[in-house]
Amino acid sequence: MKNRTKNIATSIIIIASLFIVNGCSDDYLDNTKVYAEDSESFFNSEADYYSALVAAYDPLQSTYINVLMGEIASNNTLCGGETATNVPGYQQVDDMIHSPVNSELQSLWSLMFGGVNRAAYIIEFQDKTDFIGKEIIIGEARFLRAYYNFELVKWFGAIPIKAEGRFGVGDEKTIPRSPKAEVYAFIEADLKYAVSNLSYTTPQVGRATKGSAEALLGKVYLYQDKFTEAAAVLEDVITKGPYMLETDYNKIFEAAGENGVGAVFEVQYTDVEGASFDCLQCSEGNVAVGFQGVRFTSGEHEPYTYGFSFNVPTQEMVDQFEAGDNRKEVAILDIDAFVEVRKQELLADSDPNNDDDFPRYTLGYEHTGFFNKKYIPRVRSANAAGDLNLTNPNNYRAIRFADVLLMASEANNRKSTPNDTKARLYLNRVRARAFGNTNNEITTGGTALTDAIYQERRVELVGEGHQFFDLVRTGRGTQIPGFSTNKNELFPIPIEEIQFSQGKWTQNKGYTN
């Protein structure tokens, strides 16, 4: 492991094909049972464990659906797209009329369980062969199993878990859905192991670290209202980890900002060809980026390129930014303002009577005039591979240091013995960067401070897939249009999974099979 320095995403391209996951299947077990290597004859060397680890990282790239659909589910954006029937699964989630028959929710379930099983494959055979540094691989495998399980419990609540290793065919008929408290305890145990066995540095860009595990553990505590525990572990990330806020907020979501000083954990993407619209999850690129682009039709529109106009921010969301907040220009693309500026630039450099180069676009469904600028497709080189909408190399900033600071702020404010001084300190660090000065500090305490933290999370993390779950975990789900209390806090278990269980699993409350 010591001599491996290339990006984990590069290794994924080479190795993941050895560990086949059929993401198009309906049954999550079919996603996880097929391997090119026989389990009993594998794991005989460090190289075998490393290959399995890289394969366990690979399903992270399919979490683009979690981010895109999670944002659409919130009150930040509308689904958008081409028409009212373009990707019905997203449209239903946006309108809170989704049911157990939803192909996008089925994909999310299947792909995340595929990730669980790939990580569990390593854990199952962790004692087969010894070598120096094996505890690091096992620590990362347990981080990944926790990451995938956390995604599942966020979306679906009670889920089946299996401590000893992989799920097998037929397990869905015998293993029940474990209550959320048991799932969270399982996740906590995995993350505590990872914290104890990983360091803050890694030999390969993109791999999980001690800080990644601590930050995710802090988030898991926060989702359970374990504020004292969350404050303690997040304090370690802040005071002992190597992270800091990126000085230039404009840089964070550009290529130059990937894996920067504020990156606690990023999902790595590349622009390697290999995907198609028949198998979006086969892409090594960030598919969500192309989905969120402007429907440009002609003209010069650098630095952006065309896309499918999904996940469009609302005017209400745009209005959440205070005057002087520099994050607005980074997070939100006002397309008409952009087009006007581009026109003026072109007029200054060319024949004023020739408007052929002016950027033009068509209106998508639910057009608001705004786009998610954080994850909008950028113009790439002429020799970029494949369909440009499927091979965008934009990393997903899964856990940013600003998120850690705001989680720590909330935990300190909401724990049984609040520390509002520390809560304000961490909140105002984020605000100071946003405004470029210290003139906009929050000075309140108590519930007023809580509300300020919630608001700061919304504007800092807009477009990154967190808002729906922040609203639900804090009892504010009714702020989402169409949200039904005691139902929409969770999403339905896909109908296929209920059927496969042959009566072992019941549906989430409020949904009818």
Image: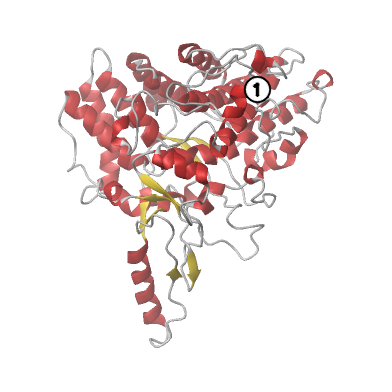
Residue that lies at the very extreme toward the left in this rendered image: 444
Image coords of residue 458 (percent x, y): 32, 39
In the foreground, 395 or 47: 395
Give the side of residue 6 with respect to residue 321, left or right.
right
Image coords of residue 469 (percent x, y): 39, 30
User: Mark 1: which secondary structure?
Assistant: helix
In the rendered structure, which amino acid carries the disc numbered 1? Phe
Give the side of residue 504 with respect to residue 131, left or right.
left
Q: Is residue 72 above or below residue 85?
A: above
Does the image show residue 464?
Answer: no
Give the side of residue 209 with respect to residue 8, left or right.
left
> Residue 476 lies in what quarter of the image?
top left
In the foreground, 170 or 469: 170
Does the image show residue 91?
Answer: yes
Image coords of residue 440 (percent x, y): 18, 42
Residue at 34 percent across and 71 percent down: it is 340
Residue at 26 percent across and 20 percent down: it is 414
Q: How is the image coloured?
A: secondary structure
Image quadrant for the N terminus? top right
> Residue 16 lies in what quarter of the image?
top right
According to the picture, the residue beneath numbered tag 1 turns out to be: 500
Image coords of residue 49 (percent x, y): 73, 24
Figure label count = 1
Q: Is residue 17 above or below residue 340?
A: above
Residue at 48 percent across and 43 percent down: it is 90
Q: Is residue 229 above or below residue 336?
A: above
In the foreground, 233 or 148: 148
Residue at 20 percent across and 42 percent down: it is 438
- Label 1 Cα crowd, 10 Å radius (few <14 / some 14-19 / many 20+): some
